[in-house]
Amino acid sequence: MKYKGYEAIVEFDDEAEIFHGEIINLRDVITFQGDSVKELKQAFHDSVDDYLEFCQERGEEPEKPFSGKLMLRINPELHKTIAIKAKKEGQSLNSWIEKCLCMYVP
């Protein structure tokens, strides 16, 4: 499910007979639930809107779903090897890594 750039996963609890979801592209934990698909979607939208309103009331910027910045720690020798490889291919290290990652993600 997607709403205003926020994404959620949903599961069905067979015993409780209820849908429950969680927004997955934030560090904050935001959950919601509903008895029907319609109720679940509304609860999701309400949760996102409540989060945005809460941030506004506190004068804080809401966390943006993934900024595109990724901190990564790797072995220094691997870092050196891929930096050289990227340079030889005339690319920045960021562009080269992005190209490589795209080969593994549809």
Image (cartoon, rainbow, N blue to C red):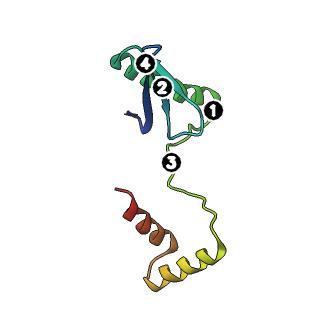
Q: Position of residue 13 (x, y in %)?
A: 45, 20
Q: Say which of marks 1 and 4 sits in front.
A: 4
Q: Are marks 1 and 4 in contact (CB under 8 Å)?
A: no
The CA span between labels 4 and 2 is 28 Å
Give the x, y percent position of residue 43.
44, 20
Mark in front: 2 vs 3? 3
Q: Which residue is mark 3?
A: 66
Asked if residue 69 is positioned above or below residue 20 in the image, the reply reads below
Mark 2 or mark 3: whose residue is earlier in sequence: 2
* Label 3 Cα crowd, 10 Å radius (few <14 / some 14-19 / many 20+): few
Marked residue nearer the N-terminal end (1 or 4): 4
Q: Amino acid at mark 3?
A: Phe
Marks 1/4: CA–CA distance: 40 Å
Q: Which residue is mark 1?
A: 59
Q: Which residue is mark 2?
A: 49
Name the residue furthest front: 15
Residue located 50% across and 38% down the image = 24
Q: Secondary structure at mark 1?
A: loop
Q: CA distance from mark 2 to mark 1?
A: 15 Å
Task: Locate residue 98, reporting x and y percent.
Answer: 44, 65
Q: Residues within 10 Å of mark 1 (few under 14, many from 20)?
A: few
| Pick the front one: 76 or 47 | 76
Q: Nearer the viewer, mark 4 or mark 2?
A: 4
Q: Which residue is mark 4?
A: 14
Q: Secondary structure at mark 4?
A: loop
Q: Nearer the viewer, residue 21 or 43?
A: 21
Say which label, 4 or 2, has the lower sequence index. 4
- For residue 70, above or below residue 89: above
